[in-house]
Image (tube, rainbow, N blue to C red):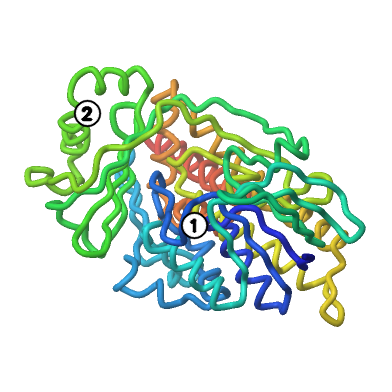
Amino acid sequence: MTYDVVIVGGSASGAACSILLAKLGLRVRVIEKQPSASAYKKLCTHFIQPSAVPVLSLLGMSHLTHGAHSVRTRATFITPAGAIDPDGFYGAQGDKYALNLERSVLDPALRQQAQECGVEISYAQSVTEVQRAAQGWMLTVEGEEQTFKIEGRLLVAADGRMSSLARLLGNAQQSFENQRATFFAYCSGIAAPDDNRSLFAHHQNGMAFLYPLINGRTLLSAYISKETAKQWHEQDVKSNLVAFFAGIADMPAMDNVVFETPIRGYQDYPNLTRQPVCQDVAFIGDAVQSLDPMSGVGCSFALQTAAMLSQAVEATMQQGTVNVQRALETYQRQFNDYFPFHARGIIADALIVKDEEGHKSTFRTILNDPELQRQYRDLTGRLILPAAFQNKFLVSKIRQTASERKVLAKQ
């Protein structure tokens, strides 16, 4: 059987891409290794950046932005120089927001929407072989009871960090060191910060992230050195995690915290990147880049790559037919114009800061300029590119230095 599109992987990026392509009138098949539609990713910050929130509207899933399903939020940064917490939300008009949208809600909802849009999804199946075919690709698919073949004119790899298609097609990964270990825990008994802010705190040469969730729950996420993580494991992870957050003055009280789930995490999570197109196959989501969860971009970049590919496909369609080569060229160009710049900053942030005074000086410059504070939050929300922020930072730094010199000269 031949499909217009075959997508390997039915998590956030694959399911989202299938919806958007089906809305274009294409016949789409998704092959998912998870056993059921209710499966979801367990280790995720589930922080949907403002850069990705509009994709939910494209998917026809705007209801997920409402209070029954998610928490509208914005980031507050607790830094060594003080709190970066400008008025308003994200963007030039201050009207864009992030979402704390749990994967237990998002992933099943995406698959349900895909099926309602006519996407064919099969579960508990994996691809074992990929071959060129007359009209695109021939895939050998292995399920619980049978092995069969399907064809697709456009093949999309959305099969995650350890992508089997990347291995089969030779899309080699680049690996970059991540010096931090990670712990995640869902809790109750913690008061939500004012206006449901999500708090990102620099603390003890690590990071502490607090995300308010629906139903009065909270996600605590800690990013610490691997040596410290080893010590926590040897002692008591729960008590160490609570003490880590309790030691930050601007965090809500931890006196009544109750752990609703086991503490999960990663001891070693290197940053991985691949090419967005390899051998005429598009790679999206974690299959193309799987970055330090501290950056909070996993879900967002998954949705954004799905939307970017579908828009490239739409731009090349004529009378219901896709020009696959042009679509892939467009996707690759647009991907490379946006994502690698953010990835480089995230990869750099995965290294533990050695120059603490220089780190503090950087945040002091940001805190001395209200506009720069807004630009910093927009950068972390992936609404502007790092170069745009760096230019504004340098201009502000020069201006502040000149002002300081004038004051000293008068003295």
**Residue furthest front as drawn:** 145
Q: How many discs appear?
A: 2
Image mark for residue 62: none
Badge 2: few (under 14), some or many (20 or more) residues near its Cα, within 10 Å? Answer: some
How far apart marks 2 and 1 lie (CA) works out to: 34 Å
- Identify whether 9 is placed above or below 24: above
The answer to which of 120 and 182 lies nearer the viewer is 120
Question: What residue is drawn where x is 29% and y is 58%?
Answer: 197
View extreme (right): residue:
134
- Marks 2/1 in contact by CB < 8 Å: the verdict is no
**Residue at x 74% of width, y 53% of height:** 282
Residue 322 located left or right of residue 276:
right
Q: Closer to the camera: disc 2 or disc 1?
A: 2
Residue at horizontal 40 percent and vertical 72 percent from the top:
65
Q: Which residue is mark 1?
A: 378
Circle 2 is placed at which residue position? 237
Element type where label 2 sits in the image: helix
In the rendered image, the vertical position of residue 397 relative to residue 46, given as above or below: above
Label 1, residues with CA under 10 Å away: few <14, some 14-19, many ≥20: many
Give the residue type that dot 2 points to: Val
Dot 1: what SS? Answer: helix
Look at 77% across and 53% down and name the residue there: 332
Where residue 43 appears, as percent x and y from the top left, is: 40, 44
| Residue 393 % position (x, y) | 54, 46
Amino acid at dot 1? Asp
Q: Is residue 7 left or right of residue 266?
A: right
Q: Residue 258 location in percent, x, y?
A: 13, 46
